[in-house]
Image: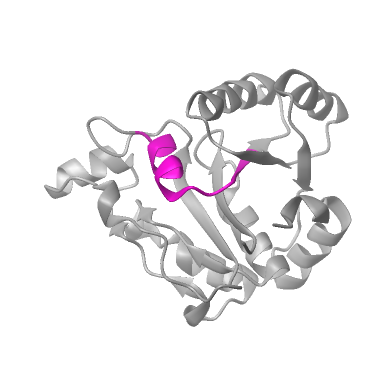
Amino acid sequence: MPERFFITGTDTGVGKTVVSALLCAALDAIYWKPIQTGGREGTDRHTVMQLAHLPRARTLPEAYRFAPPVSPQLAARRAGVRIELRKIRVPRLAPREKLIVEGAGGALVPINGTQLMTNLMKHLRLPVLLVARTSLGTINHTLLSLAALRVARLNIRGVIMVGETDRENRNAIEHYGNVEVVGMVPRLKRINRSALLEVFHKYFDRQAFRA
């Protein structure tokens, strides 16, 4: 099976969209965000297209899209709808096509009255990459997120850290989380396709992204 991953994070704004753009560029993958909130401020699909220079044909439309920048469950409730997992299916792609799926918010964000983002991950049956900050507090947030992913019996492929290099935090996450940090995205003065590709080749374990 080709490289297909679900990108989740320790919380909102941690860097999932930048990581998704980076992986789409580096792996020549299609991008898909099944649930988008905050659409009135622009979509992550559009951001990935800009950052990775990805043509629209290499992206997929959202299954659910809401304007308010709130949790999926709350946004859906305000819109008078309920997010249904059965309506979110991995699109039919050519056998060798690669796919990056970006979640909304953190791993335990609610998507309806009874289900969380982890339920969507399990429903789609894709290996999971967890995006975490490098800064103070990341050990607790990352270990809690890893625990939640394991309770859901998900296939965790690794952690990707975003921010200034912090060797101690990275070592602690790998040791106590029993997981590999497979990539790191430093602070970038400019974010564009060439910068993202350079980061992938310099800071990522390419073997971790092979099927």
Q: Please name the residue shown 70% across and 67% down the image.
A: 27
Quadrant (top left/top right/bottom left/bottom right) for the C terminus: bottom right
Q: Please name the residue shown 73% across and 30% down the image.
A: 179
* Residue 134 shows in the view: yes
From the viewer's perspective, is residue 159 above or below residue 21? above
The question of residue 119 being in magenta is answered with yes
Q: Please name the residue shown 78% across and 66% down the image.
A: 197
Quadrant (top left/top right/bottom left/bottom right) for the N terminus: bottom right
Give the image location of residue 75, x and y in percent: 25, 44
- The colour scheme used here is one colour
The question of residue 91 being in magenta is answered with no
Quadrant position of residue 64: bottom left
Give the image location of residue 54, x and y in percent: 58, 76
Give the image location of residue 35, x and y in percent: 36, 53
* Residue 192 shows in the view: no
Left or right: 28 in relation to 123: right
Give the image location of residue 117, x and y in percent: 41, 38
Quadrant position of residue 163: top right
Q: How many marks?
A: 0
Residue range in magenta is 116-131
